[in-house]
Image (tube, helix red, strand yellow):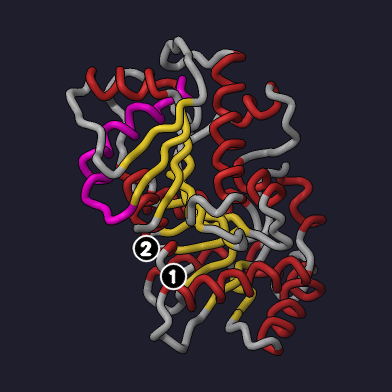
C-alpha cells in the first residue's frame, strides 16, 4: 500500500477542522497516511466533531500545544515547522512517496528563523530539486507559475528564457505522467504585457524573452505555444484549446484559478523527487474554530497525491 505523509500545518488555523472533517473520505482511499502533528489536538478535535480516526492513518506526535483558534503563538509556529522537518526526514529515509501539506503561516517561518517564503521553496531546497515550479490543478483549469511570492515590481527581472523553458519542461513531464495515453499536448504561455506587448509597442519582454523561450522549448520537443494575451488566453484554455497554462506571476494565474477552483483546487509542486500537494487556501484565522471551513480542497489534494504517487 502506498504511504503518504500529511503535515498538520498551522494548528491555530483551520487545519485541524478540515483534517478531521476529511476522515471519512481518507478512510475510503487505498493508501496509508502518516500524519505529522499534535496527537492530543487531533484526538480532541475528532471527539468534538464526533468523528472516528481512519483505520489507514497513524499519527506521529511532535508537539503538545494549547491552541486558541485564530491566534497563533511562537510555540505554534515552532511546532508547525517541526511537522514539516520530520516529514522531510521521512521522505529522505524513503518512508513516504508523497506529501500533503496543510496550510502554514508564512510569517511563522520567519519567526522560526527559516529563510523560506513557503512550502514550495523549502521542500525544493531540502529535497535538492534543481528545477521546480508551483502549479495548480483543477478539473477545468491547470496552470504553473514562472515567478511566485515576489513583489510585482520585481517580476519582469525574474523572468528569463531558461526559466520559462524549465517550467514548460516540468509541465510536459507532469502531463505525460498524468496520462500516458495522450500524445498531442498543448501548453500555453501568457504574455507579460497587455495584448502580449503588441509586437513591442506595449513592452518588449515578449519579443526578447518569451518568444525565444517558446522557440527553444519546441526545439527540445516541448509543445509550448504563445505568448498569448493573458486577458483572452484563460477563456480559450477553458474552451479546450490547451491542456495546461503557464502564467508569469502569482496573481496573473491565481485570480482566474481561484475564481473557478477556490473550493476544489489543488496546489502542487512540480520537479520534486516525490509528489507534494496541498489545499489552495491559507490558514483562514478569521473562521478558525467556527466550524465553517470547507475540506474539499484538502480532500482533492489527497486524491491527486494518491493518484500521482502510483505513477512516480
- What residue is shown at x 35% (from left), y 49% (from top)? 32
* Distance from Cα at disc 2 to Cα at disc 1: 7 Å
Q: Which mark is residue 234?
A: none
- What residue is shown at x 54% (from left), y 58% (from top)? 274
Q: Neighbour class for label 2 at 10 Å: few (<14), some, many (≥20)? A: few
Q: Position of residue 10 (x, y in %)?
A: 50, 27
In the image: residue 73, left or right of residue 7: right
203 versus 56 height, above or below: below
Instruction: Give the residues in magenta.
Output: 11-31
- What residue is shown at x 63% (from left), y 88% (from top)? 221
Is residue 288 something one can see in this rendering?
no
65 versus 227 height, above or below: above
State which quadrant residue 57 falls in. Answer: top left
Is 253 within the magenta?
Answer: no
In the image: residue 288, left or right of residue 156: left
Is residue 69 something one can see in this rendering?
yes
222 versus 4 height, above or below: below
Q: Which mark is residue 311?
A: 1
- What residue is shown at x 47% (from left), y 74% (from top)? 177
Is 24 within the magenta?
Answer: yes
State which quadrant residue 23 falls in. Answer: top left
Q: Which residue is mark 2?
A: 307
13 versus 86 height, above or below: above
Q: Position of residue 296 (x, y in %)?
A: 30, 44
| Residue sitting farthest toward the left | 50
Q: Say how many tags the image has.
A: 2
Q: Position of residue 310 (x, y in %)?
A: 40, 66
- Please state which of residues 86 and 155 is positioned toward the viewer in this rendering: 86
Assign a secondary structure to mark 2. Answer: helix
The reply to whether dot 2 and dot 1 touch (C-beta < 8 Å) is yes
Specify the quadrant that holds the N terminus.
bottom left
Assign a secondary structure to mark 1. Answer: loop
Amino acid at each position: 500500500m502506498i504511504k503518504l505523509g500529511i503535515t498538520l500545518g498551522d494548528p491555530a488555523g483551520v487545519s485541524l477542522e478540515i483534517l478531521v472533517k476529511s476522515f471519512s473520505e481518507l478512510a475510503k482511499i487505498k493508501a496509508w497516511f502518516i500524519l505529522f502533528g499534535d496527537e492530543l489536538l487531533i484526538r480532541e478535535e475528532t471527539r468534538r466533531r464526533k468523528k472516528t480516526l481512519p483505520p489507514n492513518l497513524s499519527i506521529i506526535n511532535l508537539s503538545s500545544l494549547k491552541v486558541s483558534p485564530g491566534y497563533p503563538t511562537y510555540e505554534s509556529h515552532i511546532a508547525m515547522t517541526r511537522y514539516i522537518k520530520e516529514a522531510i526526514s521521512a521522505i529522505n529515509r524513503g518512508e513516504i512517496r508523497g506529501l500533503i501539506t496543510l496550510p502554514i503561516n508564512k510569517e511563522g517561518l520567519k519567526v522560526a528563523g527559516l529563510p523560506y517564503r513557503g512550502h514550495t521553496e523549502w521542500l525544493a531546497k531540502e529535497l535538492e530539486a534543481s528545477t521546480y515550479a508551483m502549479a495548480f490543478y483543477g478539473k477545468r483549469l491547470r496552470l504553473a507559475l514562472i515567478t511566485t511570492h515576489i513583489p510585482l515590481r520585481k517580476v519582469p527581472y525574474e523572468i528569463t528564457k531558461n526559466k520559462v523553458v524549465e517550467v514548460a519542461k516540468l509541465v510536459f513531464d507532469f502531463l505525460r505522467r498524468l496520462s500516458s495515453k495522450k500524445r498531442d499536448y498543448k501548453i500555453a504561455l501568457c504574455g507579460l504585457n497587455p495584448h502580449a506587448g503588441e509586437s513591442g509597442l506595449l513592452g518588449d519582454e515578449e519579443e526578447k524573452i518569451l518568444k525565444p523561450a517558446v522557440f527553444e522549448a519546441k526545439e527540445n520537443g516541448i509543445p509550448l505555444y504563445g505568448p498569448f494575451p493573458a486577458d483572452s488566453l484563460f477563456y480559450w484554455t477553458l474552451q479546450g484549446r490547451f491542456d495546461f497554462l503557464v502564467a508569469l506571476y502569482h496573481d496573473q494565474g491565481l485570480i482566474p484559478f481561484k475564481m473557478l477552483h477556490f473550493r476544489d483546487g489543488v496546489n502542487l509542486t512540480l520537479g520534486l523527487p516525490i509528489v507534494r500537494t496541498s489545499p489552495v487556501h491559507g490558514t483562514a484565522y478569521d473562521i478558525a474554530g467556527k466550524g465553517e471551513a470547507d475540506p474539499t480542497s484538502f480532500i482533492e489534494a489527497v486524491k491527486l497525491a494518491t493518484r500521482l504517487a502510483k505513477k512516480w
